[in-house]
Image (spheres, rainbow, N blue to C red):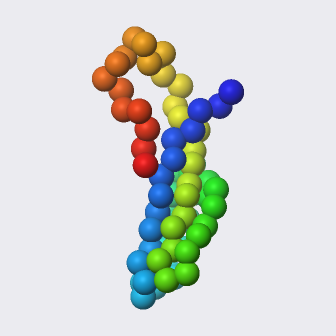
Amino acid sequence: MPKYEYRVVQSVAGAAVGHLNDRLNTMADEGWEVVTISGSETVNVLVRRPKAESAPEAESPSSPAGTV
C-alpha cells in the first residue's frame, strides 16, 4: 500500500489567485497532487505525494512522522 506525505497550502483572503496557481504548479512539478480544495475567503488546498522509499521506521525512530 502506498504511503503519502500531506501538506496544506493556504491562501489568505485578498491574496492574488495567480500566486496560488504559481505555487500549486511549482508543487506539481515536485510531485505533489491536489486532493481537495475548500474555503471561500481563505482557501485551503490539501496536497499529497508518495513518500520516498526508506528504511522501516523501527530502524530509524528519529524520522519525522509526516508533513502537515
Q: Can the viewer see residue 22?
A: no
Above or below, comparing residue 31 to residue 22 in the picture? above
State the count of labels.
0
Q: Position of residue 23 (x, y in %)?
A: 47, 67
Residue drawn at 34 percent across, 19 percent down = 61
The quarter of the displayed image where residue 29 is located: bottom right
Q: Can the viewer see residue 68?
A: yes
Q: In front here: 67 or 33? A: 67
Q: Position of residue 5 (x, y in %)?
A: 51, 41
Residue drawn at 55 percent across, 81 percent down = 40
Report the quarter where the N terminus lies.
top right
Above or below, comparing residue 23 to residue 5 in the picture? below
Q: Position of residue 32 (x, y in %)?
A: 56, 51
Above or below, comparing residue 45 to residue 55 in the picture? below
Q: Position of residue 17 (x, y in %)?
A: 51, 82
Farthest residue toward the bottom?
Answer: 14
Relative horizontal placement of residue 66, taking residue 53 as reference (left or right): left
Farthest residue toward the left?
Answer: 62
Above or below, comparing residue 34 to residue 58 in the picture? below
Residue drawn at 61 percent across, 67 percent down = 37
The quarter of the displayed image where residue 47 is located: bottom right
Farthest residue toward the right?
Answer: 1
Residue drawn at 41 percent across, 33 percent down = 65
Farthest residue toward the top?
Answer: 59
